C-alpha cells in the first residue's frame, strides 16, 4: 500500500505575529501587517513598504550566539521548527535520526546577511576587491544557504536526507512537496519541511524596484497589497517562515498524533516562457493543479477552497484566475479563492509554506481567511475572492498554488484529516 | 521498474569545455588549476583555482542572454546544450509536460550579485540591473535551461553544498519513476569573484599554497586544504523504456542507486566521524540492489582536509573491507567545483565505465595509513560494471550514488 503523508505539527513566524495562533488570528481578522519599512531607511527607493515581522530573537529563545551568527531567515526557521515539533508532540529523543530528514525552501537564502557583510568588507561599497580580513568566520554559511537546512537538522537531530529547495517563489511549496516524496518512497518517516525568507534589505528592494514588481503605493502602506483589485499595482515584499512536521500516516496514527491535514497531491511545472513574465492563459499552472488533483484522487468540483498565489501584480492575478478556470472549469466560479498576501505580503521562498500553514489552519478551524483590501475587483478577475471578511466553512479539499520567477508553477492539495486519500 | 539511463552528457570544466576534451585532458592528466586571473588574488588567503579561461559566451549563446546571465549560468547553458545534443533529444516529440529540469547550486549567480551590490552601494538604487531579481538567485539555471529548451515538466533546484549535485541527479531519477520521460539535470557552479572568494576562503579549508603541484593533495600526509573551481556537468536522464521508444542514439550508463544523509552537529562527534557517510554509502548500495563486491571503483569526495580525508577513508574501508578497490580523484585536475563536482564525477565515471579505464589523480602521494588504493600516475585499465560516487557538503551533507555502465 502506498505510503501517505500527513501534517502533524505547524510552526509559523509571520508579520503580525510569531507563532501559529497569532498568525491565524491576524488572518481571520482581515487586518493587514504591511507598513513602511523599518529595517533600513528605504526612503530613496521606489517602493518603501513591506510586511515585517516583529521578531525578537532573545524572546523567541535564541541565544545571543545564535542571534549573532544565524541569518534572520535561519533564525525564523529554527524558531518555527521548535514550534512545529512541540506542536506535533514528537519526542525528539525518540526520533530515529536516519529516518528523519529536512527540506527548507528559500528563494534568496541569507541575502540580508550577505549584503550586510558585503557592506562591511567593501568599506561601504568603495572596494571591488573586498577585504578578506573583514569577513566573518561564518561567511560561507551565508554564501551557501544549505546552512539553513543544516541548522534545522541540528535543532531536531535529523540525520536523514537534508536539503534546501530553492525554486524562487515556489520554494515553500516545493520544499514540502519534496519532503512528501521522500516519505512516500520510504527514504524517511518524518520530515521537518517548510520555507523561510527574510529578504527586506536594500538589494532586494532595489531589484524589485528595477522591474517595477513591487507597489509604489507608499502613502498607503496598510492597504498597499491589493490582490485581484482593479487598483493593484504590484506586490508588497514580506518576510516570514512556516515549518511543518510531516509524517507517514500510519506512523502518526500509531502514536495518536493530532493530524491537521493530509497532503493528497503535489505537482510542479515550468512555463519555459520567461524568467519573470507569465503567459496570460495560465496553462502550466492549470496543468500543475490538474496533476495534483489526480494524485490526490479528488475531482475538480470537490475543491472547497483555493489559497491563491495572489501577489497583486497585474499579470499574476490574471494568469492565476485563468489557471483556476482552466483546471476547475465551472467549479472555479463556485470556489472561494483568497490571497493572504493582502495581509502579510509576499515573503518569496517562504510564502508557499506560510500559505500552506494558512490552509492547514483553515481546515482545522473551519474558516477561510479573506482577501483584504479588495474593494473593487478587476473585471478580468471574476471569481469569488472572499473580500475583506473571513468566512466560516467546512473544508475537506484545499488547493494551494504558487508561481515564481524562473517560470515555476506549483500546486498542492491538502485534504481534511478524516478523509481517506486515494 | 525501468532504470534511469543517461543518454546525454555535457561537460564544462577548467580542463575541457566539452565531454571529450575534458575526458582526454583527464586521462592525460592535464590540469586546469592555476593562479586566479579574473581578479587580482594578491592579499587573499588563497590564490589558486580551477578557472575556466577564454570562455566567450557570445560564441555559444544568443546575444540577449549575455547581459542577463551570470558567468556560471552561461556555463550551465553550454553544458545543457551539449547534453541535449548528445542525447538527440527532440522536445517536440516528447509529451508536453514530460521533460523536466533539476539542477543544484551553491551560491547562485554570485558574481552577478556582487556586481549589483557594487552598483547599489557605490552608485545607488537606480543603478541596479533589471536582471538582478533573477540572475543571481539559486533557481536561475533551472529556469534558463527550461526556457532555452522549452522544457515544461517539473523544475527543481536543490542546495546542499557540494553534495547537492548528486542530490539533483537523484531527484531527476525520482521524477522519472513518477512517469516523466526525461530530465535535464546536474550542476555547473562556481563564483570566482572577490566577494565569492572571501566567502570560500572563510571556511579555512582552502589551500594557501601558491604552487599548483602542492595545493590539492587529498589522502596525502601533506594534505592542507583544497582548491575550488568552477564548472560541472549536465546530463540527460531518461526512463529506459522512453529512451528506447524514441530511439535515443545511445545509452551512456545508468543511475542505479542513491542515498543522502546528514551528519550530527559539529562538536558532538569527533571531526573525522564517518558514521553518517558510511550510512549514506550503505543505503546507496542497498538502493541499487548491490553488494559492496559489485562496486569496481570509487570516485571519492576527496576534501584534501585531513579530518575529512580520514572520515572518508574510514567510511570506505568500513564498507569495502580489505579489498583493493581503486579510488579515483579526477578533481585533482579541476579543483572542487562545489555543486558541480558530483555531476562531473558521475560524467567521468560514465566515461570510465565506457572505456574501461580509470583516470589518475595528480600531485598526491596517498598515505598508506588511509588504506585506500588511490589511482595515481597513469590511467588504470579495468573492466567495470558499477562504480560509487561520493560527495560531501560543508555542515555534514553526505550523498552517495551508484553508477552503472551502458550494459
Image: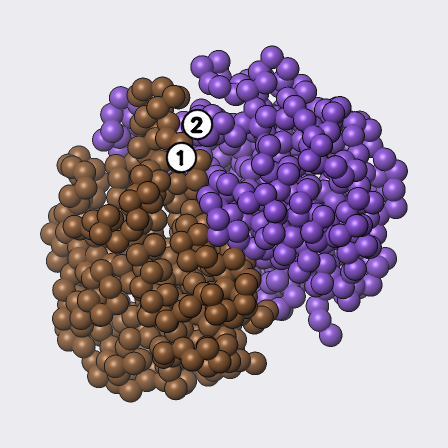
Name the quadrant of the C terminus of chain A. bottom right
The one nearer the camera, A336 or A99, is: A336
Q: Which secondary structure, mark 2? A: helix
Q: Name the residue beneath numbered marker 2.
A: A210
Identify the residue at horizontal 45%, vertical 65% (top origin).
B91
Identify the residue at horizontal 17%, vertical 57% (top origin).
B32
Q: Is residue A326 visible?
A: yes
Chain coloured brown in the rendered structure: B
Q: Position of residue A297 (x, y in %)?
A: 76, 64
The one nearer the camera, B219 or A334, is: A334
Q: Name the image quarter holding residue B353.
A: bottom left
Q: Name the residue beneath numbered marker 1.
A: B132
Q: Which of the two discs, 1 and 2, sits closer to the camera?
A: 2
Distance, label 1 to label 2, CA atoms, is: 8 Å
Q: Are marks 1 and 2 in contact (CB under 8 Å)?
A: yes
Identify the residue at horizontal 21%, vertical 57% (top origin).
B14
Chain hosting mark 2: A
A368 up-or-down from A297: above or below: above
Q: Which mark is residue A371?
A: none
A313 up-or-down from B35: above or below: above
Chain coloured purple in the rendered structure: A
Instruction: Answer few, some or many: residues within 10 Å of disc 2's Cα (few below 14, many 20 plus, some between 14 and 19).
Output: many
Going by the image, does B221 lie left or right of A209? left
B254 up-or-down from A332: above or below: below
The one nearer the camera, A332 or A91, is: A332
Q: Is residue B372 visible?
A: no
Amino acid at each position: 500500500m502506498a505510503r501517505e503523508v500527513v501534517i502533524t505539527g505547524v510552526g509559523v513566524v509571520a508579520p503580525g505575529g510569531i507563532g501559529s495562533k497569532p498568525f491565524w488570528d491576524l488572518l481571520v481578522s482581515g487586518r493587514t501587517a504591511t507598513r513602511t519599512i523599518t529595517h533600513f531607511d528605504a526612503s530613496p527607493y521606489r517602493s518603501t513598504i513591506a510586511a515585517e515581522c516583529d521578531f525578537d530573537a532573545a524572546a523567541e529563545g535564541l541565544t545571543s550566539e545564535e542571534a549573532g551568527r544565524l541569518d534572520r531567515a535561519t533564525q525564523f526557521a529554527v524558531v518555527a521548527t521548535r514550534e512545529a515539533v512541540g506542536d506535533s508532540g514528537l519526542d525528539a529523543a525518540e526520533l530515529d535520526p536516519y529516518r528523519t530528514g529536512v527540506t527548507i525552501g528559500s528563494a534568496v537564502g541569507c541575502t540580508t546577511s550577505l549584503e550586510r557583510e558585503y557592506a562591511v568588507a567593501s568599506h561601504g561599497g568603495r572596494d571591488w576587491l573586498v577585504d578578506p580580513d573583514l569577513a566573518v568566520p561564518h561567511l560561507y554559511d551565508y554564501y551557501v544557504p544549505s546552512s539553513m537546512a543544516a541548522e534545522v537538522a541540528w535543532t531536531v537531530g535529523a540525520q536523514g536526507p537534508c536539503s534546501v529547495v530553492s525554486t524562487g517563489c515556489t520554494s515553500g511549496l516545493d520544499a514540502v512537496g519534496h519532503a512528501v516524496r521522500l516519505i512516500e518512497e520510504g527514504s524517511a518517516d518524518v520530515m521537518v519541511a517548510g520555507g523561510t525568507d527574510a529578504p527586506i534589505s536594500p538589494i532586494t528592494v532595489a531589484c524589485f524596484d528595477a522591474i517595477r514588481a513591487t507597489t509604489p503605493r507608499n502613502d498607503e502602506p496598510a492597504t498597499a497589497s491589493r490582490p485581484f483589485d482593479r487598483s493593484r499595482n504590484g506586490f508588497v515584499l514580506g518576510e516570514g517562515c512556516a515549518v511543518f512536521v510531516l509524517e507517514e500516516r500510519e506512523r502518526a496514527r500509531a502514536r495518536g498524533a493530532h493530524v491537521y491535514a493530509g497532503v493528497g497531491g503535489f505537482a510542479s511545472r515550468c512555463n519555459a516562457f520567461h524568467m519573470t513574465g507569465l503567459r496570460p492563459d495560465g496553462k502550466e499552472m492549470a496543468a500543475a493543479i490538474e496533476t495534483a488533483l489526480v494524485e490526490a484522487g479528488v475531482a475538480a468540483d470537490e475543491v472547497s477552497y483555493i489559497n491563491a498565489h495572489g501577489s497583486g501584480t497585474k499579470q499574476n492575478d490574471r494568469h492565476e484566475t485563468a489557471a483556476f478556470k482552466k483546471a476547475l472549469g465551472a467549479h472555479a466560479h463556485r470556489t472561494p479563492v483568497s490571497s493572504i498576501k493582502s495581509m502579510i505580503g509576499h515573503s518569496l521562498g517562504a510564502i508557499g509554506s506560510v500559505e500552506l500553514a494558512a490552509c492547514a489552519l483553515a481546515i482545522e478551524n473551519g474558516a477561510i481567511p479573506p482577501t483584504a483590501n479588495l474593494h473593487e475587483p478587476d473585471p478580468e478577475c471574476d471569481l469569488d475572492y472572499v473580500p475583506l471578511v473571513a468566512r466560516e466553512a467546512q473544508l475537506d479539499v484545499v488547493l494551494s498554488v504558487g508561481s515564481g520567477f524562473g517560470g515555476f508553477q506549483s500546486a498542492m492539495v491538502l485534504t481534511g484529516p478524516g478523509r481517506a486519500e486515494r | 521498474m525501468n532504470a534511469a539511463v543517461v543518454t546525454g552528457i555535457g561537460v564544462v570544466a577548467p580542463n575541457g569545455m566539452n565531454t571529450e576534451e575534458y575526458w582526454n585532458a583527464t586521462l592525460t592528466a592535464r590540469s586546469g588549476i592555476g593562479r586566479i586571473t579574473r581578479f587580482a588574488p594578491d592579499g587573499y588567503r588563497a590564490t589558486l583555482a580551477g578557472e575556466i579561461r577564454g570562455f566567450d559566451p557570445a560564441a555559444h549563446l544568443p546575444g540577449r542572454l549575455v547581459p542577463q546571465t551570470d558567468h556560471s549560468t552561461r556555463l550551465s547553458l553550454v553544458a545543457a546544450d551539449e547534453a541535449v545534443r548528445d542525447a538527440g533529444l527532440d522536445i517536440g516529440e516528447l509529451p508536453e509536460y514530460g521533460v523536466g529540469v533539476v539542477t543544484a547550486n551553491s551560491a547562485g549567480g554570485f558574481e552577478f550579485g556582487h556586481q549589483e551590490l557594487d552598483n547599489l552601494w557605490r552608485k545607488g538604487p537606480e543603478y541596479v540591473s533589471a536582471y538582478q531579481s533573477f540572475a543571481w538567485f539559486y533557481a536561475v539555471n533551472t529556469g534558463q535551461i527550461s526556457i532555452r529548451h522549452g522544457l515544461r515538466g517539473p523544475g527543481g533546484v536543490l542546495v546542499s553544498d557540494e553534495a547537492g549535485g548528486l542530490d539533483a541527479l537523484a531527484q531527476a531519477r525520482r521524477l522519472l519513476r513518477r512517469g516523466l520521460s526525461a530530465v535535464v539535470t546536474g550542476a555547473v557552479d562556481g563564483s570566482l569573484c572577490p566577494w565569492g572568494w572571501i566567502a570560500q576562503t572563510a571556511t579555512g579549508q582552502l589551500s594557501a599554497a601558491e604552487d599548483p603541484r602542492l595545493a590539492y593533495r587529498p589522502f596525502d600526509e601533506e594534505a592542507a586544504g583544497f582548491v575550488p573551481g568552477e564548472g560541472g556537468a549536465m546530463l540527460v536522464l531518461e526512463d529506459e523504456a522512453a529512451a528506447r521508444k524514441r530511439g535515443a542514439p545511445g545509452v551512456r550508463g545508468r543511475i542505479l542507486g542513491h542515498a543522502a544523509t546528514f551528519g550530527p552537529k559539529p562538536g558532538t562527534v569527533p571531526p573525522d566521524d564517518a558514521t553518517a557517510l558510511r550510512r549514506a554509502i550503505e543505503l546507496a548500495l542497498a538502493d541499487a540492489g548491490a553488494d559492496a563486491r559489485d562496486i569496481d571503483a570509487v570516485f571519492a569526495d576527496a576534501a584534501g582536509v585531513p579530518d575529512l580525508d580520514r572520515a572518508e577513508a574510514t567510511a570506505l574501508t568500513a564498507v569495502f573491507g580489505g579489498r583493493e578497490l581503486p579510488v579515483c580523484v579526477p578533481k585533482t585536475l579541476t579543483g572542487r567545483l562545489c555543486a558541480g563536482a558530483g555531476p562531473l564525477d558521475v560524467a567521468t565515471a560514465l566515461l570510465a565505465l565506457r572505456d574501461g579505464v580509470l583516470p589518475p589523480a595528480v600531485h598526491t602521494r596517498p598515505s598508506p595509513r588511509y588504506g585506500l588504493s588511490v589511482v595515481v600516475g597513469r590511467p588504470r585499465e579495468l573492466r567495470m560494471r558499477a562504480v560509487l560516487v561520493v560527495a560531501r557538503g560543508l555542515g555534514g551533507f553526505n550523498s552517495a550514488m551508484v553508477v552503472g555502465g551502458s550494459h
